[in-house]
């Protein structure tokens, strides 16, 4: 059954809190002199189906429901959260926030208006309305494609995940907004054993979509990709250690920008002097080949949103243009300290987390170098076909990430696979060293963890060359 | 919105649905934190959170459903969701609920009055001033945070089990940012337990010292050499690979230790203990995530693998008794397996003697990217590191931006010595700890 977003927005979404109740809660929240107050309420259904050892093993089925009141006064912020979303519960929560802020009297009037924003991610098939057996059929297609790929595959784990995240935001600057953020993901992890050596491979496509995602994501291809990677790596020798040029492929390869640079451009670091890129707006911080974008408006993309968690309509931001730093990613609260407006970057895992500035879909834009030229330019180095996760310390910019599928490049040719590689370096240096950028931009999906919890984000880039980076191996 | 009212409604709904075996698990907490930036309180947060997980056995399968919405009117829907989920499961292992009437170790938890908000604010502000004063290199960007938590777990089931647990703790986080004018870096120190007994000066000094120690420094040279892991580094490595001791991982082929019980898997220097009642843990607990009694065990004793960690289901598969390591990573999660306070038992050498024995190598006190660069299935790791060079048996120049690579299963065999000083710091139900260890040989990738 195909339904329009607007239809079920009105009927099926749980009874959100009325404007009148929000106004009373916000009035209580500002009663001790706050200059801004916000109510965030949530009702989310998280559903996961896991398969292992060829069987459907567990099903997770969780309702997350609660609310948080946040108040600001100048550069101070207070947040209180509760699982009690009755009017009395919300008023108690607001009272608690107001009391924690201190002594004072109310100084602002509250008039809420329905926020107008476009639904850029209409959902056609709501996963919550689809039976377990239909989701299991998709999961099994992916699972058994991986299992059947080779006799070397000794174990497979598969997960079908869907999230139905309903949020309401009301704030004293007049915002009254609701959004329904649905996302769907299929994940396959395969274990291969070759000559007593075990290695893993994975593939985890996801979209900010419903079941219509499978009109163009082939479950079998997902399983095969995971299995192929595991078998390739199980047969590989260890990656040699050293400093060398590295070509990093598109898709999840974009994790390099996310870690090396993205986190350091979030206001949560910049506003507190805890970033390698503080005070660098307008300066050339990257190689002129690098244009980097954070875009929450890409229809159906894993990291996309209609509004951020402060109710600001989603935006596309050019972070770096031809090497020059153009903007940071900013939320309302940290924007105060920086004297800058929100860029619709406020995000939180749930009501229980204090929101802060985060990424959405972040990528290095397509350049002009041909893929074959990039590989051919490397005399000896590493080709990272697929990356694993990574992390960064935004203060120093020191980052690391794992190479899930790597190959040695010799005399401009991709040669044998190597396993166990990681890349480490310093963000401010690496973005200077990205000296070739290919033409085929693609994105990969991840869950990004930071102070406001775990949120869906896309990373992306075309094939790039980093002229020199430390490769950890042995 | 009250747990006890909801519990009665769920039990009534389960009985009405004709269920014979079911369990309701509750986990909730009240958390407060106060943060200082520059010289003022800039953040205050308080949360009341909690949720329940209902699980039931239908045709031999265990179905789960969870919620934070404890409206008694929705109790029947929760039961129905769990039953629907059970209906499509295929796993063939037998499932169990813990029977009531078992004997539990007596816990020695003295009632503890948590600090008031005013006390938290005053400690946070003074910690921040002490942090600025700790070293002239400390700069704006540093933060101090004081937190308190009351944590509750309750499990009841159709087999007569009815358990409750409550604990409270408070603590201090000191996050130092330092600069020498050329370079900026940071580090932090956490101390949990009872705020009024925490030595604020020591915590702050440690945070500043750790951060200042990272200034300057060079990239380590690429080499294969002896490595000394400082307690913090070894602890994070142990945490990243703790799942290899899970019987569930072993039974599913995700650990290489499945057939190794009773065999030597590590050097004689290695004894690995799991202790739910460690005296330095602020969260001792006498029942696990399934309600089974917990107890202390040596997982590895002088190199020999005595036992993996089991829950009711995996123990039945192996024909053994549970080790009381059933665990839930939050109210909604399926029962898995985790240790409690999991630590390498101290040896006899001091850290100085360990360094002397290493002679020439690398001392690593910080490891990064463990969620990505450590693969528990293969045991391979390649991790961002920082520390010092060891030359002439002593720590010399600071080094960073290099990686250490190896394989955890091999590393267990290459630990030649474990130092004598052990400090346990729990930040949750599961805590990892280790003295410094000397590993005879690992790969360092740097310049």
Image (spheres, helix red, strand yellow):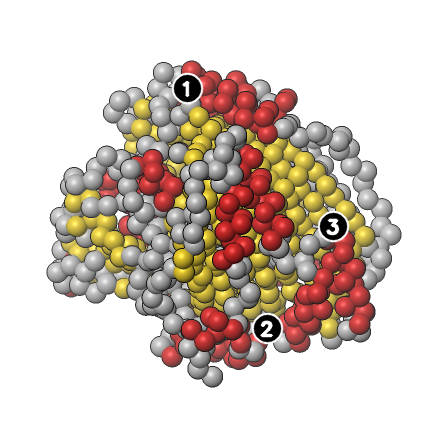
Report the Cα–Cα distance between label 1 and label 2.
57 Å
Residue B130 vertical placement versus B112 (above, below) = above
For label 2, the residue is: A55
Q: At numbered mark 2, what does the secondary structure look like: helix, strand or loop?
A: strand
Q: In this view, does B316 lie to the left or right of A201?
A: right
- Residue B64, position in %: x, y? 66, 65
Q: At numbered mark 1, what does the secondary structure look like: helix, strand or loop?
A: helix
Q: Do labels 3 and 2 share a chain?
A: no
Most distant residue in the bottom direction: A1
Report the Cα–Cα distance between label 1 and label 3.
43 Å
Report the Cα–Cα distance between label 3 and label 2.
31 Å
For label 1, the residue is: B132
Q: Which of marks 3 and 2 is in front?
A: 3
Q: At numbered mark 3, what does the secondary structure look like: helix, strand or loop?
A: strand
What residue appears at the point 43 percent right and 52 percent down from the top-left corner?
A: A111
For label 3, the residue is: B154
- Residue B377, position in %: x, y? 50, 56
Crowding near the residue tagged with mark 1, few <14, some 14–19, many ≥20 C-alpha atoms within 10 Å: many
Q: Are marks 1 and 2 on the same chain?
A: no
Name the chain letter of the residue that bears numbered label 2.
Answer: A
What residue appears at the point 57 percent right and 54 percent down from the top-left corner?
A: A66
- The earlier-in-sequence mark between 1 and 3 is 1
Q: Is residue A466 left or right of residue A22?
A: left
Crowding near the residue tagged with mark 3, few <14, some 14–19, many ≥20 C-alpha atoms within 10 Å: some
Name the chain letter of the residue that bears numbered label 3.
Answer: B
């Amino acid at each position: 059954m195909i339904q329009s977003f607007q239809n079920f927005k009105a009927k099926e979404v749980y009874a959100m809190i009325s404007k009148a109740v929000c106004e009373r809660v916000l009035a209580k929240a500002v009663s001790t002199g706050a200059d801004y107050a916000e109510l965030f309420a949530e009702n989310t259904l998280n559903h996961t189906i896991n398969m292992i050892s060829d069987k459907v093993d567990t099903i997770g089925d969780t309702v997350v429901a609660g609310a948080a009141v946040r108040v600001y006064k100048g550069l101070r912020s207070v947040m209180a959260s509760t699982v009690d979303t009755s009017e009395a519960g919300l008023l108690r929560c607001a009272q608690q926030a107001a009391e924690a802020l201190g002594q004072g009297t109310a100084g602002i009037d509250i008039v809420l208006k329905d926020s107008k924003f476009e639904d850029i991610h209409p959902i056609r098939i709501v996963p919550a309305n689809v039976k377990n057996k239909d989701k299991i059929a998709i999961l099994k297609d992916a699972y058994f494609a991986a299992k059947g790929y080779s006799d070397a595959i000794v174990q497979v784990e598969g997960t079908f995940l869907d999230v139905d995240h309903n949020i309401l935001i009301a704030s004293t600057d007049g915002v009254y907004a609701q959004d329904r953020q649905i996302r769907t993901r299929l994940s396959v992890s395969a274990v291969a054993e070759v000559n007593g050596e075990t290695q893993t491979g994975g593939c985890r496509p996801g979209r900010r979509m419903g079941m219509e995602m499978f009109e163009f994501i082939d479950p079998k291809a997902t399983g095969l990709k995971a299995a192929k990677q595991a078998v390739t790596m199980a047969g590989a020798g260890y990656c040699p250690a050293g400093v060398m040029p590295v070509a990093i492929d598109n898709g999840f390869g974009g994790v390099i920008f996310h870690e090396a640079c993205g986190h350091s451009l979030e206001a949560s670091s910049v506003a507190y002097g805890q970033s390698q890129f503080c005070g660098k707006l307008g300066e050339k911080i990257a190689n002129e080949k690098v244009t980097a974008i954070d875009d929450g408006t890409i229809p159906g993309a894993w990291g996309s949103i209609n509004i951020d968690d402060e109710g600001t309509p989603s935006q596309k931001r050019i972070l770096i243009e031809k090497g020059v730093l153009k903007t940071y990613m900013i939320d309302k609260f940290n924007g105060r300290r920086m004297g800058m407006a929100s860029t619709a970057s406020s995000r939180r895992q749930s009501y229980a987390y204090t929101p802060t500035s985060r990424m959405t879909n972040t990528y290095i834009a397509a350049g002009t170098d041909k893929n074959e030229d990039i590989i051919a330019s490397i005399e000896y180095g590493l080709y990272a076909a697929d990356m694993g996760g990574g992390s960064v310390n935004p203060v120093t910019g020191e980052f690391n990430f794992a190479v899930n599928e790597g190959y040695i490049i010799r005399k401009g040719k991709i040669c044998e696979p190597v396993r166990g590689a990681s890349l480490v370096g310093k963000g401010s240096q690496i973005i200077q060293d990205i000296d070739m950028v290919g033409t085929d931009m693609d994105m990969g999906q991840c869950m990004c963890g930071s102070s406001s919890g775990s949120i869906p984000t896309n990373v992306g880039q075309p094939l790039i060359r980093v002229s020199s980076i430390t490769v950890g191996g042995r | 919105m009250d747990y006890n009212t909801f519990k009665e409604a769920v039990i009534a709904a389960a009985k009405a649905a004709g269920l014979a075996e079911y369990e309701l698990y509750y986990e909730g907490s009240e958390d407060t934190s106060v943060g200082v930036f520059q010289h003022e309180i800039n953040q205050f947060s308080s949360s009341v959170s909690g949720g329940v997980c209902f699980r039931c056995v239908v045709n031999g399968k265990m179905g789960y459903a969870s919620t934070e919405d404890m409206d008694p009117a929705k109790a029947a829907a929760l039961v129905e969701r769990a039953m629907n989920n059970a209906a499509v499961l295929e796993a063939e292992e037998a499932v169990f609920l813990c029977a009531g009437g078992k004997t539990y170790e007596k816990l020695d938890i003295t009632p503890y009055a948590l600090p008031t908000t005013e006390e938290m604010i005053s400690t946070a502000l003074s910690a921040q001033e002490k942090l600025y004063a700790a070293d002239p290199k400390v700069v704006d960007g540093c933060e101090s945070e004081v937190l308190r938590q009351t944590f509750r777990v309750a499990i009841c089931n159709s087999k007569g089990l009815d358990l409750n647990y409550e604990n409270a703790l408070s603590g201090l986080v000191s996050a130092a940012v330092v600069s020498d004018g050329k370079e900026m870096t940071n580090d932090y120190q956490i101390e949990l337990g009872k705020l009024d007994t925490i030595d604020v000066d020591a915590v702050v000094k440690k945070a500043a010292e750790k951060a200042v120690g990272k200034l300057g420094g060079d990239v380590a040279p690429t080499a294969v050499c002896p490595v000394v892991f400082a307690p913090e580094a070894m602890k994070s490595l142990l945490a990243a690979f703790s799942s290899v001791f899970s019987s569930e991982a072993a039974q599913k082929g995700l650990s290489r230790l499945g057939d190794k019980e009773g065999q030597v898997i590590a050097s004689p220097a290695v004894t690995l203990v799991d202790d739910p009642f460690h005296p330095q843990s602020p969260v001792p607990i006498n029942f696990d995530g399934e309600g089974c009694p917990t107890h202390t065990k040596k997982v590895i004793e002088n190199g020999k693998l005595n036992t993996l960690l089991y829950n009711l289901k995996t123990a039945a598969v192996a024909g053994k008794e549970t080790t009381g390591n059933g665990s839930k990573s939050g109210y909604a999660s399926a029962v898995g397996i985790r240790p409690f306070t999991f630590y390498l038992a101290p040896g006899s050498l001091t850290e100085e003697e360990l360094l002397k024995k290493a002679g020439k190598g690398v001392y690593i006190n910080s490891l990064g990217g463990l969620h990505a660069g450590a693969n528990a299935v293969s045991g391979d790791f390649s991790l961002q590191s920082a520390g010092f060079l060891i030359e002439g048996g002593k720590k010399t120049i600071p080094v960073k931006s290099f990686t250490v690579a190896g394989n955890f299963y091999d590393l267990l065999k290459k630990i030649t010595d474990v130092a004598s000083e052990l400090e346990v710091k729990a930040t949750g139900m599961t805590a990892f700890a280790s003295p410094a260890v000397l590993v005879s040989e690992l790969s360092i990738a740097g310049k």
